[in-house]
């Protein structure tokens, strides 16, 4: 029964990650044939991050792993469909952007401005800013990882 609950939560997470991936793909003028791959990439990325977090991996590292997975799949699709990898990967990364952490940091900053300095608000703001910065960095590194590994002039090893 616990596996069924986990599977349903995973499917729910993946389904709702597809929506912003397709939405941003439309904003970025991705060709219609590539929209389903953007949706699949967004679902796989957010779903893999969800699974890693359920296994106890911190969100920053889970985001790095999920972004790397999406980047690798995007490179595979780009070779298969003769398109640039960014067509498939950028929109698929959007659902993993840390909007909640940035919002909480901003709200804490507004509260500090409104009610004055308090160590609790300052701590909350700094924690959320650092978490948001590390998640964005993980997205950027994960997006660049296939290029760093596959498109080098010299071999990695």
Image (spheres, rainbow, N blue to C red):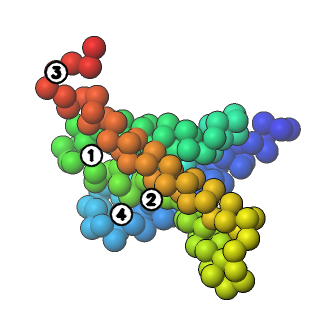
Mark 4 Cα-neighbour bin, 10 Å: few <14, some 14–19, many ≥20: many
Q: Is residue 115 above or below residue 117?
A: below
Q: Residue at x 34, y 36 (%)?
A: 145
Q: CA distance from mark 1 to mark 3?
A: 21 Å
Label 2 SS: helix
Q: Which mark is residue 25?
A: 4
Q: Which mark is residue 94?
A: 2
Q: Distance of mark 4 from mark 1, alpha carbons?
A: 13 Å
The residue that disc 1 covers is 85
**Image quarter for residue 53?**
top right
Label 3 neighbour load within 10 Å: few <14, some 14-19, many 20+: few
Please say whether residue 127 is visible from this viewpoint. yes
**Which residue was labeled with disc 3?**
154
Dot 2 and dot 3 residues touching (CB under 8 Å): no
- Regarding mark 3 in the picture, which secondary structure is present there? loop
If the image is split into quadrants, where does the N terminus sit? top right
Q: Are marks 2 and 4 in contact (CB under 8 Å)?
A: no
* Residue 113 at x, y percent in the picture: 63, 82
Reading the chain from its start, which is encountered first: label 2 or label 1? 1
């Amino acid at each position: 029964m616990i596996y069924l609950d986990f599977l349903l939560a995973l499917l729910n997470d993946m389904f709702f990650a597809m929506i912003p991936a397709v939405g941003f793909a439309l904003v970025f003028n991705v060709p219609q044939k590539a929209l389903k791959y953007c949706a699949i990439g967004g679902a796989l990325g957010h779903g893999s991050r969800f699974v890693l977090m359920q296994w106890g991996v911190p969100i920053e590292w889970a985001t790095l792993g999920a972004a790397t997975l999406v980047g690798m799949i995007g490179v595979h699709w780009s070779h298969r469909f003769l398109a640039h990898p960014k067509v498939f990967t950028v929109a698929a990364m959007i659902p993993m952007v840390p909007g909640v952490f940035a919002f909480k940091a901003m709200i804490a900053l507004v509260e500090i401005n409104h009610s004055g300095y308090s160590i609790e608000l300052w701590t909350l703001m700094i924690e959320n800013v650092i978490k948001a910065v590390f998640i964005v960095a993980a997205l950027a590194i994960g997006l660049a990882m296939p290029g760093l590994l596959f498109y080098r002039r010299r071999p990695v090893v």
